[in-house]
Image (cartoon, rainbow, N blue to C red):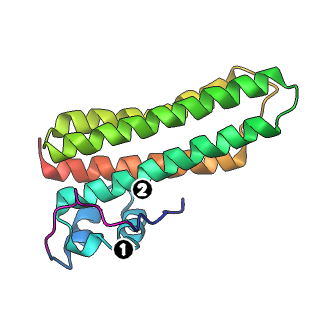
Amino acid sequence: MPACKEQAIPDPRVPRITDDNLIQKTCKSTKYYEFCLSCLKSNPNSPNADTKGLAVIMVGIGMANATATSSYLSSQLLGTTNATNTKKVLKECADKYTYAGDALQASVQDLVAESYDYAYMHITAAADYPNACHNAFKRYPGLAYPLELARREDGLKHICYVVLGIIDILGW
């Protein structure tokens, strides 16, 4: 199960409401109940958030994942010597994770505006960018897909699927 990074900074976009069972109810509607619960319970904003706020919190966690993965890939580029194909693929992957972060950022604006169809589209795109990275490695048979990158990919996809489940209950 991927790890969930906590987004501890209070977010003014997270609407406030108090319902102790809302996190459990919301997470039950997602594909990854335990993961959702772990992420949301580790965030200090969650207990007072409404359903849309919980989606925004999860998107924030996804943005942190995408940014950290892009930074990780960029740091791997620095450690790569003369392997041209490796550099190409790492750069492409870093870009894809940056795009994923951008798509997640756009989804926050969509959620706030209650444009759930657009939010869904942006989250789906963010979940798909890691596939493009994985496919880039497949284009070069000699390059192995790093285990750390597979772990990060899995984490971002889990986060995105949780957000999509939350959007489903928001209705659109």
| Image-quadrant location for residue 132 | top right
Q: Which one is nearer the viewer's eye here, 106 or 126?
A: 106
- What amino acid is at disc 2? Ile
Q: Which residues are magenta?
A: 9-17
Q: Earlier in the sequence, mark 1 or mark 2?
A: 1
Residue pictured at 46% horizontal, 32% vertical: 99
Left or right for 134, reference 19: right
Specify few, some or many for label 2: CA neighbours under 10 Å numbering under 14, 14-19, or 20 or more.
many
Residue corresponding to mark 1: 41
- What amino acid is at disc 1? Lys
Residue corresponding to mark 2: 61
Q: Is residue 29 visible?
A: no
Residue 112 higher or lower than 7, as above or below:
above
**Element under disc 2:** helix
Residue 45 higher or lower than 141, as above or below:
below
Image quarter where the N terminus lies is: bottom right
